[in-house]
Amino acid sequence: MTGTRGRPRSEDARQSILRTALELCERDGYQDLTIKSIAETAGVGRQTVYRWWPDKASILLESLTDLATRHPALEAPDASEPVLDRIEELLTTTFELARSVTGQALVGLMSDAQRDPALSERLQATVIGPRRTALRTLLRQGVDAGDLAPTIALDLVVDFAFGTMWYRLLSRHAPVDAALAREITAAVAATLAPRAEGRTDNIPR
């Protein structure tokens, strides 16, 4: 969430701060990330950072939101592709970013959000919600086209896909990567496979 105080921001400085925050968080962990380290590494003063954001969580939320705008697959996978290919593309991009760039930020923000309802709402609105909506939209399109059958609630399928990601990020027992995206897509295809006798759309939209 961007602050409104102070003079207009330099876009170069803004991008440097957002990029630096994610890089330091991934390298050092969320708990060790400080405004001081972000400012020093980005080459700006701490007061500049505080003038634009009130805390590190706000910087990371904007970093994650800004990152999504630079990865079209996160918002609108190519509509000309088969729906399962689009689902795999969305999951692959999400998981690869979590593996290499955003994982520590996501886990740290989620942890703090358990004790901060306002942060929880912001995290849902800017990061978690849009990804859930994107996947559910693809699933609904697949159902409407007859490529998938709503044998279980689509929201439950979304929970399965992203719940697996969160579990692995938190437990670190297995990777969050392109292979996982393929496996989940295959599981979705098997779970929502159209029945031979025809569609039975009795699950609420």
Image (cartoon, rainbow, N blue to C red):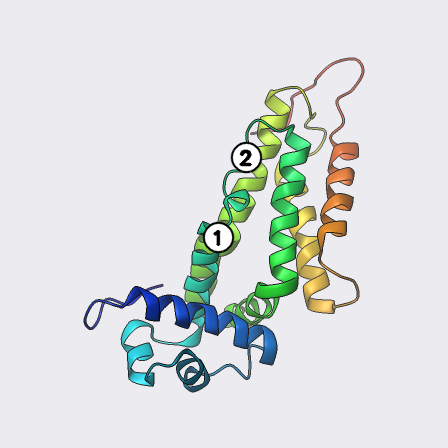
Instruction: Tell me which amino acid carries mark 1.
Output: Ala
Sequence-first tag of 2 and 1: 1
**Residue, disc 2:** 137
- Nearest to the observer: residue 67 or residue 154: 67
Looking at the rendered structure, the secondary structure element under dot 2 is helix
* Rendered image quadrant of residue 151: top right
Q: Position of residue 18 (x, y in %)?
A: 42, 68
- Nearest to the observer: residue 178 or residue 195: 178
Residue drawn at (64%, 38%), measured in percent from left and top? 87
Q: Quadrant of the N terminus?
A: bottom left
Residue drawn at (62%, 36%), measured in percent from left and top? 86
Q: Residue 186 vs residue 118: left or right? A: right
Q: Residue 161 vs residue 80: left or right? A: right
Instruction: Tell me which amino acid carries mark 2.
Output: Thr
Looking at the rendered structure, the secondary structure element under dot 1 is helix
Asked if labels 1 and 2 touch by Cβ distance under 8 angstroms, the answer is: no
- Residue 4 vertical placement versus 187 (above, below): below
* Rendered image quadrant of residue 137: top right
Residue drawn at (75%, 22%), measured in percent from left and top? 194
Q: Quadrant of the C terminus?
A: top right
Q: Determine the residue located farthest toward the left in the rendered image.
A: 7
Q: Which mark is residue 86?
A: none
